[in-house]
Amino acid sequence: LLALFRHPVERLISQFYYRQIATWDPSYRPDWKDMDVAHWAENVNDESNSLVKALAGLDHDADVITEEHLSMAIRTVGYRFVIGLTDQMEESVHRFNIFMGINESEESKRECMNQYFGHGIKRDNSNPHPMIEKGSPAWRALAQRNKFDIRLYMAIVEQFYEQNQIIASYAMAAWEWEDEVASDMSKAIEEMDEDAEEEETEGDGPLFDEFNNQLNGYLSAEQPTAVIHIGPPVTGSISLQISLKQSDVITALMEDGYSMPWFMLGKETSSESVLAACFLTEKKKAARMANDKNELCPEEELSVLKKLGDEGKSVFLSAETFTASDPGQLANFFESYWRVTIVYLHRWFHDWVFSMYEQTEKSDLWFQHGSFEKFMAANGSGDVHHVRFLEWFEKIYKYDFEWGAYQTFYRFKEHFDHVVALDYDDKHASIQKKVFCDGVPNARRTCKHFSTQTEEAKNPGEPSVYRMIAYDASMLGVITYCSAENFRHVAHLIRNYHENTLGLSQFDFPMKCLEEAMLERLIDLSVEHRRNILTTVPLSKADEIEIRTEYWTKVKQRSCHADTNAILEMPEWLEFFDALNKDGQCP
């Protein structure tokens, strides 16, 4: 069966205005013409969850609807219908055409589609009427009486997007449709429904949790949505934030109903990190004030955010600084204006630990001072702020890794009802697509934008081992340099000599490595976090074996660092640096 579905509240409101003018329809109600819609919704309308009742086989006048009836209605839709949505009318008709074997490439069919969906076309069968705001008294009254229909509708929307994958596979054969193809499609839809039914028998799964979250949103629609992407670090936040500067992304987000405070201020770049600083823990706030001369929490930023809240506007914010915030303080502020969704990117813990160190090491603080001498003068010769990996790792191991990004997730779960954990390691989608398709509610246009984008190839950059050797050689007086530019050049020369002259790789230096017990604890905790955080994507035993095997294959390369003291005692390297100094490469 083919069916078009509409949001239950929007359908009822449209019906209210239609029956005022439909003199040709037996349901014509002229007495409604001068009636206030809120009065009608609260005192006159007697329709309640009619769609669930119809699909579950209940009488129209049935007073009691249960979760079982809702589940039955959802199964019926998934099993019996090719789904269309009125707010996706053109796409819906396109799917119906595929299912019925109508070839849209034929001129007559193309003209028909253009007639109804061409640019600037007015729909002849539509009934213009005033728009009713979500959260208005009329909306709330209708939503309250149709809770189950709203939950069913959210399930239908979910199935609409799931069916896209099935229907798309038949698009090329649409004009050669045969009974066996139709049968295959029915079986595919039936299998999808059986999977959903299995989830239901195991209790309320993530799908029903999402329905309840969406329902709460509609019932408290006077509260708009605030989506806060909190990172954590080294999970693609910078890539996401760079994309937010693009005008087409800003436009798509605004069309989806989301405002961004920094854009409202007319700034060219995101300032959410400054805004997030308003909610830092006291310890982090003191540290920030000691090291940052800029205003900690500019009133201008906070005022714009409050203004958006007062106006009932939904907002989207992204800043890793939120990971250091006080979730309780954050919840107290945001939940007074918005219903809040926290978006968190989960990365395998062992991979995150190594990447976190590598990012820290690559942020060489002396680069910020322009020269090594200025860096030493600023920090003192006895404190160079450069910690070896083994020292860094052993320090966090001592506290059983109970820190940073993963504690952030658990802390936020204590204060917010809706924390969405997304799989950073899923290679089938970009970070942007994951966030806006799976994390941000009702961001369809933004999701569609990133669904058509391709990721650019990433530059792997200079391996850190060569920078480390250049740094140690300078500290021991083997070489000298005067600027950050010289330092980078020395690292490049070291790499060229090692790989091209000696014919060796970055892993062929003398190495110092972590103890195996530490590495074992790291992968155990990584699997534990994965199970606790990504609960909607179960980790099978086979998947666990695969990730552990891959871990032990690659971990030696990442858990060891070059023994630069041993390297700088090797004759070939002493000769190299001697020649380097004589050639004036490091003036």
Image (spheres, rainbow, N blue to C red):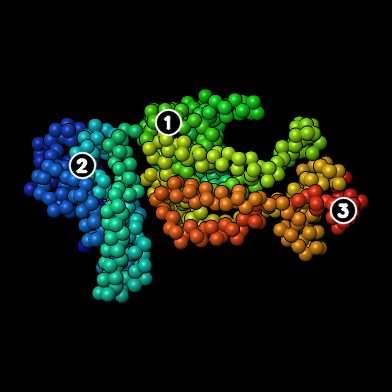
537 to 8, vertically: above or below: below
**Res. 585 in view:** yes
In the picture, the quarter occupied by the C terminus is top right
Q: Eyeballing the image, is 343 above or below 284? A: below
The local crowd at label 1, few if under 14, some if 14 to 19, many if 20 or more residues have their Cα within 10 Å, is some
Residue 559 spot, x, y in % from top left:
65, 52
Which sits earlier in the primary sequence, circle 1 or circle 3? Answer: 1
Tell me which numbered mark, 1 or 2, is placed earlier along the sequence.
2
Amino acid under disc 1: Ala
Q: Name the residue under label 1.
A: 331
Q: Nearer the viewer, residue 338 or 110?
A: 338
Q: Position of residue 267 (x, y in %)?
A: 55, 35
Q: Work out whether residue 107 or residue 266 is closer to the camera in this orientation and state it.
A: 266
Image-based side of 444 in relation to 33, left or right: right
Residue under pointer 2: 146
Q: Position of residue 578 (x, y in %)?
A: 90, 52
Q: Based on the displayed image, in which of its 4 quarters is residue 480 positioned? A: top right
Q: How far apart, in angstroms, are the residues tagged by discs 1 and 2? A: 29 Å
Instruction: Indicate the amino acid at tag 3.
Output: Leu
Mark 3, residue position? 574
Q: What element carries label 1?
A: helix
Q: Nearer the viewer, mark 1 or mark 2?
A: 1
Residue at the limit of the structure toward the right, as seen here: 582
Q: Which residue is drawn at 42% across and 41% down?
A: 419
Q: Name the residue at 54% across, 25% down.
A: 282
Q: Is residue 109 visible?
A: no
- Disc 2 on helix, strand or loop? loop
Q: Do the residues labelled 3 and 2 touch (CB within 8 Å)?
A: no
N-terminal of the pair, mark 3 or mark 2, is 2
Asked if residue 78 is positioned above or below residue 298 in the image, the reply reads below
